[in-house]
Image (cartoon, rainbow, N blue to C red):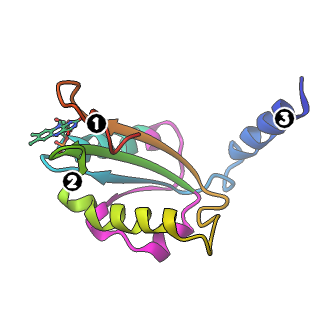
Amino acid sequence: MEKNSVERVRSFANLTIPGNMPEVVFYFGSQTGTAEKFANQLEEDAERLGVEQSKVIDFNNFTPEEFCAHKFVVFVVATHYEGDPCDNTKNFHKWFKGLQRDKSNPTPFKGMKFTVFGLGDTSYEQFNEMGV
Ligand SMILES: Cc1cc2nc3c(=O)[nH]c(=O)nc-3n(C[C@H](O)[C@H](O)[C@H](O)COP(=O)(O)O)c2cc1C
């Protein structure tokens, strides 16, 4: 096995040791409730599968300090209007876009693992814009 693969297996194996698993945080961006339900469902599934600490956060309640302290984030975000964030995601989206322009801190999410579930509809021209 390549060195990189060995490291990955080792770091995954470490997560299976009780107490080693970071909290998994599910942030949802939702206009009509689908992404919110999905985030809650994912969190229940994670708990059932043995994730020791998890919680669901409405993007309305996002703060940069709390967000940057997370180690493992799952984004569950819908796209609305014309490729735009949902109302509850606008503050986060504005902050995030600002970070991309800010060259003074190139690695604000160092050490954070994340994944994105985007909800959209292919009949819209800006399909799943928030997820991508
Ligand atoms: C008014 C409106 C605008 C939408 N705009 C987009 C869009 O631009 N791109 C897209 O991929 N989906 C779009 N969608 C589809 C939603 O993202 C999709 O239905 C999603 O599941 C809704 O999630 P929510 O219930 O959590 O808000 C739109 C839906 C509505 C009702």
- Disc 3 marks which residue? 4
Q: Is residue 75 part of the magenta span, yes or no?
A: no
* Label located before the other in sequence (1 or 2): 2
Q: Is residue 98 above or below residue 72?
A: below
Residue 39 image point, x, y percent: 32, 45
**8, 29: nearer the viewer:** 29
Q: For disc 2, does the CB lie below 8 Å from ligand 1?
A: yes
Q: Is residue 127 left or right of residue 19?
A: left
Residue 75 image point, x, y percent: 40, 48
- Disc 1 marks which residue? 119
Q: For disc 1, does the CB lie below 8 Å from ligand 1?
A: yes
Q: Residue at x 45, y 44 (%)?
A: 47
- Residue type at tag 1: Leu
| Cβ atoms at labels 2 and 3 below 8 Å apart | no
Asked where in the image residue 19 lies, by quadrant, the reply is bottom right
The label number, if any, that marks residue 86 in the structure image: 2
Q: Is residue 10 left or right of residue 101?
A: right
